[in-house]
Amino acid sequence: MSIKSSIKTVLTLGKGVTVGIPPAAEDVDPIEFFGIWFEAAEESGLFMPEAVALATTTTEGTPSVRMVLVKSVDERGFVFFTNYGSRKAHELDANPQAALCFHWAVLERQVRVTGSVERISEEESYAYFSTRGRGSRLGAWASKQSQTLPDREALETRVRDAKSRFDGEDVPLPPFWGGYRIRPQTIEFWQGKADRLHDRLVFTRDGDGWSTERLYP
């Protein structure tokens, strides 16, 4: 974290705790409200505020959780990317329900999202993939994500092979790589407060709109 970011982080401490979640937030679209909170997280100096815990389950109900990066958010939902051969992808394809939890500690804020999951279009995946650095694009071709790796040299060999394969060419989108979109059914905004008397505001999908309720901390 840079000195500038560290100063921002210090100046942000306690800000959310003091303000809380005002009653007016209940009348705001939750995606719009998420955008306000995300912008505050960016301005606070936090490293990678787009990092989020993604929870999935097998069809038998065995849970699994890991950190991913949400790369876009709009009225359709929250989008992240992965190798379609990964464990998370297999679980999402078999049981297309998932949960997200953003945690911005310096603001004492969490956002929890639950909903159904779908793959995004190849065109959308390519639009993002093309913005990645060449090394990351080559890495996507080289990695057999979540499969057993005999040793580091095996991965480095696959990276060299990918570099040779696409030498002097643009690195295309792998057919086994792309994005998923979580279409939110519920979005909970959690704001830490003194004495653990936290604010919790939940938006639940209601037809074309949202209903809201406050929860005890």
Image (cartoon, rainbow, N blue to C red):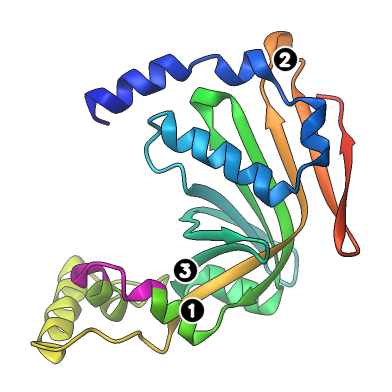
Q: Residue at point 64% right, 79% down?
A: 93
Asked which secondary structure carries label 2, the reply is helix
Location of mark 3 (residue)? 81
Q: Quadrant of the C terminus?
A: top right
Q: Badge 3: how crowded within 10 Å, few (<14), some, or many (20+)?
A: many
In magenta stretch: residue 129: yes
Q: CA distance from mark 3 to mark 1?
A: 11 Å
Location of mark 2 (residue)? 196
In magenta stretch: residue 77: no
Q: CA distance from mark 3 to mark 2?
A: 35 Å
Compared to residue 101, the image places residue 197 above or below, namely above
- Mark before the other along the chain sequence, 3 or 2: 3
The quadrant where residue 1 appears: top left
Q: Residue at point 23% right, 76% down?
A: 138
Identity of the amino acid at label 1?
Glu
Location of mark 1 (residue)? 124
Please state the horizontal and vertical placement of residue 24, each as a whole percent of the image: 80, 31
Please state the horizontal and vertical placement of residue 31, each as a whole percent of the image: 68, 51
Asked which secondary structure carries label 3, the reply is strand
